[in-house]
Amino acid sequence: MSPRATRRAPRADPESGRGQALRRTAGRSATAVGESLAIAREYARPLVERLRVLGDRFFEPAGRLVSPLGFVVAGTALLLWLLGAIFGWQEALLGAFMAALLLVIAVAFVLGRTDYDVRLELNRTRVAVGDRAVGAMVVKNVSKRASFGATMELPVGAAVAAFRVPRLQPDAEHEDLFTIPTRRRAVLAVGPVRSVRQDPFGLLRRQVSWTDEYELFVHPQTTALDGSSAGFIRDLEGMPTRDLSNSDVSFHALRDYEAGDDRRHIHWKSSARTGQLMVRQFEETRRSHLAVALSLNLAEYGEAEADAADDFEVAVSAAASIGLQATFEQRKLSVLTQTGPVRTDTGRNMMDGLTRVEGRPTPRHTVVDLVRTAADQVPNASVVFIITGAGTTARQLREASMHVPLGVRAIAIRCGHGLTAARANIGDLTVLTLGSLDELGLMLRRAAA
C-alpha cells in the first residue's frame, strides 16, 4: 500500500471540547441569573408600587410646599449637624443652627389662614387669532378680620401672571383686569387662580387654589369667501349626476308614459300635441357635501421647522374658512385629518376641533393616505378640498387624485408663505397655490370659473 493511500484518523481537540463545555456552563449560568432577576422583579413590583403610592401621597405635597432651595437648606442643616455631632466641630453645629433658624422663620411666613371669595371671569372663551381676550379677577375678603396683602397667580397656558392684592377690610373687593395675548392658534388653560404665600428667602411656598380651570380657544384666522366655496354646485339642491330619476328637481327630458308613473309628472301640452301621454324625466341630484382633507404632515410644508409651522397655520386657516362658509350656507361638511375626523355638526365645534389639531412629521401618513381615507369615509362628497403644503410634489397630488371617485370635483390647495398665487391642472385635479390667506377667495373664484 502506498503512503498516500494511508489516512490518519483526526485527533480530538481537547481544547475545543473544554471550550464548548465552558460555553454551555456560562449559558446555563446566564439563564439562571436572568430567571432570578425576573423572579426578583416580580416579587419587588408590589413593593415598588407601594413606595410610589407613598411617595405621591407624602412627598408630592412636600414638593409643592418646599422649594428646591428649601430642600438644599434642610439637607445642609442635617449634614452640618451630623458632622458637628460626629467630629465635634462647633462651626458645623453653628451652621446647622442658622440653617434651621431660616427654616423656622420661613414656616412663620406661610402659616395662617385667609378666607377669600375669588371670581375669574373671561369676556369670551373663544376668540380668533389677533383678537383681544379680556378677563377679570375679583378677590373679596369674606372673613371678619382685615386680610394682609397677598399675591395671586393666574396660569395662562405655560405662562403665569402675578397680581398683587392689597390689604382688604372685611367684605372689601379688589378687581384686576388682564389681557391674554392671542398671537397664535392654541387652546389655553386659564386658571385656577391661586394665592401664594412665601417667605422672603424663597424656601417655602404655600399655594391655595380658589377657582376652576377654564379653556380659552384661540381659533385660527379666517377670511370671508362670499359664496366662492359653493361655486362648484350647479343648483340649489346639489350637483346633477348622469343617473335618471322619475322625480327630482333637475329636469332632463320627456318620455312615453309607462304603467306606474306618477300622473303629477305628465306633461299635458306635449301629450296633446303627440296624441300619447308624455311624462317628465329628471336627473338625480345629490345634496352638496364638501369634504376637506387637511394634511397634518409637517414634512409636506416648509423645509425649516419654523417655516413649516407657519405654512401649516395658513393651511389650517384655509380649511377653517372653507368650513365656515359651508356651515353658513347650511351644507354638509366633513373635515378629516391623519388623526381622524373633526366634529362639524356646528361651526363652533368645527373651529374648536381645528384649534386642537397639531402638525407633526408623519412620513408614513402622507396626503395620499389622507385622501384615500377621505374617499372611504365620505363616499358621497360632491367637492373634495385637499389642503397641504408647498412640499407636496405633483406626483403625490396625482396619486392622491386617483383616489377621488369619478364625478367628484377635487381641488388641491398648496399653502406656503411667500408663494405666488397660481392655478394649474393635473388631469382632472385643480391645483391652487396659496401664498397668504387673503388670496383664498380670489383663487377659489378662479377655480370655479
Image (cartoon, rainbow, N blue to C red):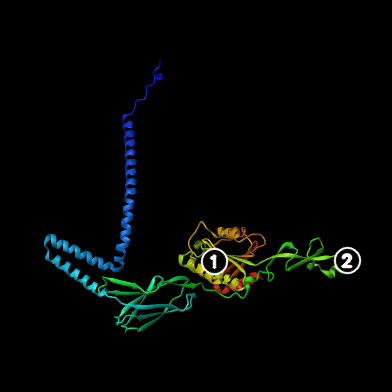
Give the residue drawn at x 58%, y 58%: 372
> From the image, which quarter does the N terminus lie in?
top left
Taking the view exactly as shown, the residue that stands out farthest to the top is: 1
Residue named by callout 1: 343
Mark 2–mark 1 distance (CA, rounded to whole Å): 56 Å
Q: Can the viewer see residue 10?
A: yes
> From the image, which quarter does the C terminus lie in?
bottom right
| 48, above or below 223, in the image | above
Q: 116 and 237: which one is in front?
A: 116
Give the residue drawn at x 27%, y 73%: 110
Q: Amino acid at mark 1?
A: Arg
Percent of width and height locating residue 63: 30, 66
Q: Secondary structure at mark 1?
A: loop
Q: Secondary structure at mark 2?
A: loop
| 20, above or below 274, in the image | above
**Neighbourhood count class around disc 2 (C-alpha, 10 Å): few under 14, some 14–19, many 20 upward:** few
Give the residue drawn at x 14%, y 66%: 93
The tag earlier along the polypeptide, 2 or 1, is: 2
Residue named by callout 2: 275
Q: 264 and 255: which one is in front?
A: 264
Q: 351 and 408: which one is in front?
A: 351
On the rendered structure, is 28 left or right of 73? right
Q: 79 and 246: which one is in front?
A: 246
Q: Amino acid at mark 2?
A: Gly
Taking the view exactly as shown, the residue that stands out farthest to the front is: 144
**Neighbourhood count class around disc 1 (C-alpha, 10 Å): few under 14, some 14–19, many 20 upward:** some
